[in-house]
Amino acid sequence: MIASKQARLGDAATYALLTLLGLFFVAPFMWLFSLSIRTPAEVFLGASRFIPEAPTLANFQGILSDPAFLTYLWNGLKLSVLGGGLAVTLAIPAAYSFSRLRWRGMSALLVAILAVQMISPLVLLVPLYQWLSALDLLNTQLTVIAIYGALGMPLAVWLLKVAFDAIPVEIEEAAHVDGATRWTVLIKLTLPLARPGIASAFILAVVMNWSQFLVPFILLERDSDWPISVAIFNFAGSTSASTTQVLAAACLIALIPAVTVFVLLQRMIVSALISGAVKG
Amino acid sequence: MTGFQKKTKRFGSRDPLPWLAPALLVLAAFYAVPVLDVVRLAFSDATLFRPPSSYSLNSFVDVLTSSVLPDVLITTLVFTGLSVIALQCVGLTIALLLVRGERRHLPGMASFRTLVLAAWVVPGIANGLIWQMLFDEAPYGTLNSLLGSVGLGPIAWLSDPTMAMLSAVIANVWQGTAFSMIVFYAARKGVDEALYEVASVDGANGWDKFWAITVPQLRLAIAANSILVAVQTLNTFDSILALTGGGPGRATEVLALFTFNTVFYNLDLSGGSVLALVLFALGLGFATLVFGWLRRDST
């Protein structure tokens, strides 16, 4: 009886703390939304009204009917998806050999792959910029995609290794007895079985690319090449107090795709991350 | 010979090289060679648009004796230190609350986790811009008008150097907590529940159990997470760039942002390379420190 009373007190404390923390995490989203549906006049009312007197979708309409903005969204999507796809493609054979073959130096290379993720993209871009400039590869989206592939590969290798580890070797051996080569087995059998892991690695890479600012900001000069992250930064530099509501709407549009994908698929992604964290 | 080795031998070639070739090429071209090239450039006189013509220690001397560097390093240490402590405290608190809530079958735990994760995937630039709107110091600024309505404030969130630093940390914690939350959640799930049951039988309260079981059991996770979070924070600069631009003055100009400005605004490639090495060394140094502490602790 005493124990259950204590437990219920504990429940109340749990909720009290989570509510406080929840406020901190939810407030910026709510406020951004509130600002984005205001008229310029109502922005100046500040926090006195959360839901504006005359909510308006004009800010969103304005942005989404601007062809330049749609181009930024499309660029963001294109760079993120292709970069994420490249990262996973590069990672698959390496992850497979980490999972299925035993060779000297394997654990050292795995640690190295984990360690390179700690190198700031900024450190890498300092020399890369010069080479790319010498090779005349600046201002092309392909270069950005290649760099996204390289930046996303290490995490993908780890996640895919964990995914492959979870598939019993015996299944592959059965196929091998039937005369299939490792490549055939990988493509026909292992990859389809590892679909959830591959999807998680891909989506994580895409979401990270969507957030990338430094790489496209430095490598892409033409504004028709920019992804949304670079565009809103430049847009913010040109706005004033009277356009806060437009900037809020633009920020909201920039974060909605990443947040939506992540929220819908979080169960799968988080369990992939957790098993990666436990193994690593 | 173990059964597993027999099996792998039976099953095709064991040569890993063809499998590893793409990954190794990427590691070489995009990581190893650039890092080596940063070292070379640090000894050179290169600018962003002029390749090196001679090699010397001049850039090292210039950068390391510049009057700005100490300020930048202090800013970096304060920002990283505060962020790492806050991120881990908040992340650990949330992870433990979630585990407790799930054990008690309390509703709402999954949605709370989702909320924290949602902040994690907000692009860094958008994060800076969102908090800039919240911290807006105009009378109609969000937080100040809220404080004003209860007779407090206004607070100089972004124009006072100390507050600006705190504001940058707050924005960073809002976005970064999810990572620590996942790590600690996974680690806490791995702790044997029997330990807690035995402690309960012995009459330990929640606080005792936290210090006697949770913290020691999560030691490894805390150490590993400190390194990862510290390095992530050291490398963060897009949210600061959007939030304060490094200001007021240099109050929030962390090393990563300073390096970025040196290379891409001052076009000083060799000086920026020296700074990039300092950035690299800071992360490496911290990781070595924590590993050393772990090793000493476990013997």
Image (tube, rainbow, N blue to C red):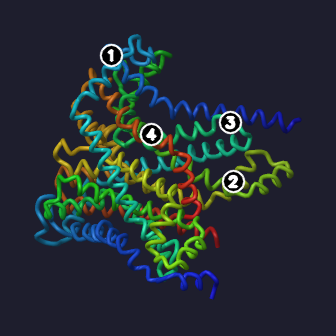
> Comparing marks 2 and 4, which lies closer to the viewer?
4
The numbered mark at residue B219 is none
What kind of element bears circle 1?
loop
Q: Mark 4 or mark 3: which comes first in sequence?
A: 3
Pair 4/3: label in front: 4
Mark 1 highlights which residue? A39
Label 2: few (<14), some (14–19) or many (≥20) C-alpha neighbours in 10 Å:
some
Q: Mark 3 points at which residue?
A: A14
Q: Position of residue A278 (x, y in %)?
A: 59, 61
Q: Which amino acid does label 2 sit on?
A: Thr
Q: Give yes or no for contact between labels 2 and 1 (Cβ–Cβ under 8 Å).
A: no
Residue at the disc numbered 4: A259
Circle nearer the viewer, 3 or 1: 1
State the separation of the CA atoms marked 2 and 1: 51 Å
Determine which of the numbered discs, if any, sits on residue B214 in the image: 2
**Label 3 is placed on what type of residue?**
Thr
| Residue B24 shown left or right of residue A219 in the figure | right
The answer to whether A38 is drawn above or below residue B106 in the figure is above
Q: How far apart are marks 3 and 1 (CA)?
A: 39 Å
Q: Are marks 2 and 4 in contact (CB under 8 Å)?
A: no
Q: Which residue shows up at 20% across the image and 59% down it?
A: A129
